[in-house]
Amino acid sequence: MAGGGLEAVLIDWSNSPPFGRRKTLIGTLDLLAERKSDEQIIVEVGTSEAYSPDGLGNALLAFAYYADLSGGMVHAVDIREGAVQNSGAILREHYPNGTMATTFHRADAFEYAAFVNDPAHDWSLSKIDLIYYDGPSEPAFWYVELHRRWGHLFRSGALALFDDTDPQSFAGKGALLIPYLLGTGWRIVPVDGEPVSPMALLEKT
């Protein structure tokens, strides 16, 4: 597993913008901070459609805050023009500092994955430190096929966070991908979770 190294960071969440499921997201990002050794890359598959007063659906605000303070980068991917525009507006309103650390991509996730794997493309990535799977709930095999496209970009210590997924039964968006990952060198990481819209977290060993 990747160690924290000299560049590991400690994030102060007291001034963070409003977002829900704070225990899960903060726990995940604090774990990511512990293993920071270079610029970290977060990829969000499926971004916010609208701002919610209770914070559900606003995970991007947590990712942008973390990336801004840690010197990382967030790539938010969604095929829906409305989601990309609305998510950008939410970020500009609630945490404008995070706009410099966030790039939005209006694209099909599989199209985006192909660009990520193309060294000649502007969207290419050398690695992914945290993947957030928050696309459609069905079909579940969609997530397995997508992950296979960029699985080589996850090195030891990388994290995969699943929205709307029971961390015990894996029911939800991670129903098929989580068992697949558990058979290919990943493990479940326990995190404090909320009963509403639970999340599951995995780590590449």
Image (tube, rainbow, N blue to C red):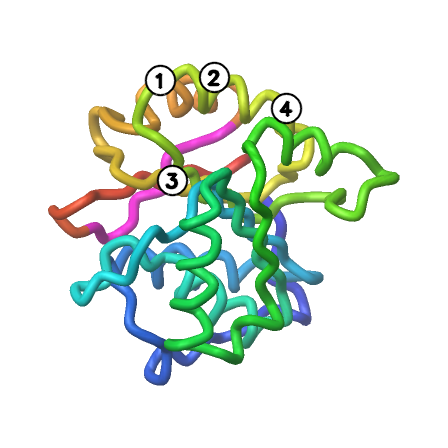
Q: Which residue is mark 1?
A: 139
Cβ atoms at labels 4 and 2 below 8 Å apart: no
Distance from disc 2 to disc 3, alpha carbons, whole Å, reads 22 Å
Q: What is the crowding at mark 2: few (fewer than 14 residues within 10 Å), some, or many (at least 20)?
A: few
| Quarter of the picture holding the C terminus | top right
Q: Quadrant of residue 200?
A: top left
| Quarter of the picture holding the N terminus | top right
Residue type, mark 2 in image: Gly
Q: Of helix, strand and loop, which mostly describes the magenta segment? A: loop
Helix, strand or loop status at disc 3:
loop
Q: Position of residue 83 (x, y in %)?
A: 41, 50
Tell whether position 159 is magenta: no
Distance from disc 3 to disc 4, alpha carbons, whole Å, reads 17 Å
Residue type, mark 3 in image: Asp
Mark 4 or 2: in front is 4
Residue 56 drawn above or below residue 205:
below
Q: What is the crowding at mark 4: few (fewer than 14 residues within 10 Å), some, or many (at least 20)?
A: some
Cβ atoms at labels 1 and 4 below 8 Å apart: no
Magenta stretch in the rendered image: 186-193
Helix, strand or loop status at disc 4:
helix
Q: Position of residue 52 (x, y in %)?
A: 22, 61
Q: Which residue is mark 3?
A: 134
Residue at 58% across, 63% down: 102
Distance from disc 2 to disc 1, alpha carbons, whole Å, reads 20 Å
Q: Which residue is mark 2?
A: 183
